[in-house]
Amino acid sequence: MGFPGATTQVDFGSLEEVIVNGMDGGAGEMSVRMFFDGRRRIIQTRMPPGSSIGEHLQTTGDDVNFVVEGTGTAFCDGKEEPLRPGTCHVCPRGSRHSIANTGATDLVLWTVIVYEVEREGDARHTTDPEENRSIRQGISADELVER
């Protein structure tokens, strides 16, 4: 089954690479390519040595980060987790987390965030796109830093 508005294949090479400085108050800059269809976000992130994603509250959905290259450290609700190729760091919605590249080479992550489907009557339900960013299509670099 394909993603709404897309084929079953997402070509990340064709997506715009965005350079983000100080993501969520972290250190350094990193490159990001992102697919977002309003219900799920798939992100390829390349973090140079010494860069980090600052601590932030995961508000939109569970954040699942799969390490492809490099080494680093993740913190989720105060618990430290080493990152290396093949590991997966999961930060549930409502948790606080950060990620740092502590290695000598780039840390490459694939991140998937699946948003909860909001239904009319749910406490979180809104039809106002300014109140519910998860139903908006697309994202700017400024919004990515705020995520």
Image: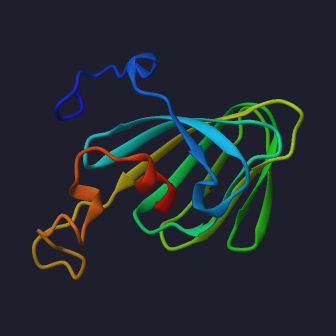
Residue shown at 59%/54% (left/top)? 23
Residue shown at 45%/17% (left/top)? 13
Residue shown at 10%/72% (left/top)? 120
Which quarter of the figure has residue 24? bottom right
Residue 134: percent from left, percent from top: 28, 58
Determine the residue located farthest toward the right in the rendered image: 104
- Compare residues 106 and 2 and report the one nearer the observer: 106
Which quarter of the figure has residue 129? bottom left
Residue 114: percent from left, percent from top: 38, 51
Residue 36: percent from left, percent from top: 33, 41
For residue 121, above or below residue 2: below
Q: How many marks?
A: 0
Residue 101: percent from left, percent from top: 79, 45
- Compare residues 90 and 41 and report the one nearer the observer: 41
Residue shown at 54%/49% (left/top)? 64
Q: Name the image quarter holding the N terminus.
A: top left
For residue 28, above or below residue 124: above
Determine the residue located farthest toward the bottom in the rendered image: 123
